[in-house]
Image (cartoon, grey):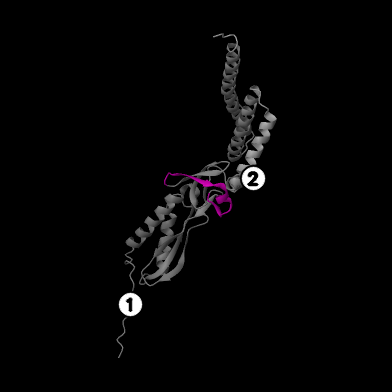
């Protein structure tokens, strides 16, 4: 069989395939390098980490599309037509997956409006935890029990968002159930003094101890110290412990319901 007819063709296409493969490897390396340079430049400008991650994600996608079009052009494909087809396919996919576009738009608004940033402790979309990443479609949140949770951006943006980190301190809200026989004025003073001794409680504003409500067992005191966000759970648990210790040290009886029985005649 005469190899002169097909050998040049094999060599030609083989060379192009090897060239495309090399271009893909080099191109992917260049994309990572460019994204790294952009991230470094944005970091030096003190741009928020959330915006840097979001911009990096978009840049990676755009550069990969450019790389694919360049490789197709190298093989002789009409990239103009391919770009039109890609745009049409994107429109069709966007229509079918309108929810993804909603998540994408919500992600852009989250970056622009800045209700929270990476590292903030928030409650949003039915999840509470620390924000790890704000992506193009989902926000990654690490919950308090160390579980990574991915929440759709649109679900977050269309719901209430609580940012526990934004203010420098927060209030711990706890209750102390007293028996009806306890001297309430005395209990308030003793509990307030004990709360002030808890580590990391703020002196200003000072802890609040007031009558919050009443139950069949007796009055309910509100124990509300203030602390920095980093110390919330330590103060929370120490406050509960302090309530128990104050009641025990002063001999307050276990809260019980009291009934008065009247003998009807």
Camera-side residue: 62 or 185?
A: 62
User: For numbered disc 1, what is the local secondary structure?
Assistant: loop
What is the crowding at mark 1: few (fewer than 14 residues within 10 Å), some, or many (at least 20)? few
Residue at position x 32%, y 61% in the image:
248
Q: Earlier in the sequence, mark 1 or mark 2?
A: 2
22 relative to 195, above or below: above
Taking the image as shown, residue 145 lies to the left or right of residue 204, namely left
The stretch drawn in magenta includes residue 154: yes
Residue at position x 57%, y 26% in the image:
28
The percent coordinates of residue 117 (x first, y second) are 57, 44
The percent coordinates of residue 124 (x first, y second) are 53, 51
Residue 261 position by quadrant: bottom left
Quarter of the image with the C terminus is bottom left
What is the crowding at mark 2: few (fewer than 14 residues within 10 Å), some, or many (at least 20)? few
Residue sitting at the far right: 80
The percent coordinates of residue 42 (x first, y second) are 63, 33
Residue matched to label 2: 112
Camera-side residue: 163 or 156?
A: 156
Which stretch did the figure color magenta?
145-164
177 relative to 152, above or below: below
């Amino acid at each position: 069989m005469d190899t002169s007819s097909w050998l040049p063709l094999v060599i030609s296409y083989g060379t192009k395939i090897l060239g495309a493969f090399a271009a893909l490897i080099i191109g992917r390396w260049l994309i990572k390098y460019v994204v790294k340079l952009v991230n470094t430049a944005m970091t030096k400008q003190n741009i928020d980490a959330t915006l840097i991650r979001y911009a990096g994600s978009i840049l990676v996608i755009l550069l990969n599309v450019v790389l694919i079009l360049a490789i197709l052009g190298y093989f002789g494909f009409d990239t103009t037509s391919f770009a039109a087809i890609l745009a049409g396919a994107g429109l069709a996919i966007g229509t079918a997956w309108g929810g993804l576009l909603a998540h994408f738009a919500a992600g852009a608004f989250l970056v622009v409006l800045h209700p929270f940033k990476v590292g903030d402790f928030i409650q949003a979309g039915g999840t509470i935890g620390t924000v790890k990443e704000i992506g193009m479609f989902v926000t990654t949140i690490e919950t308090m029990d160390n579980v990574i949770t991915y929440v759709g951006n649109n679900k977050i943006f269309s719901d209430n968002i609580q940012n526990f980190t934004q203010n420098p301190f927060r209030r711990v809200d706890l209750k102390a159930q007293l028996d009806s026989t306890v001297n309430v004025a005395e209990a308030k003073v003793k509990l307030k003094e004990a709360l002030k001794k808890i580590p990391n409680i703020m002196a200003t504003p000072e802890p609040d101890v007031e009558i919050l409500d009443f139950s069949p067992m007796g009055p309910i005191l509100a124990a509300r110290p203030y602390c920095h966000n980093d110390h919330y759970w330590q103060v929370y648990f120490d406050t509960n412990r302090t309530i128990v210790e104050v009641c025990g040290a002063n001999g307050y009886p276990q809260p019980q319901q009291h009934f008065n029985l009247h003998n009807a005649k």
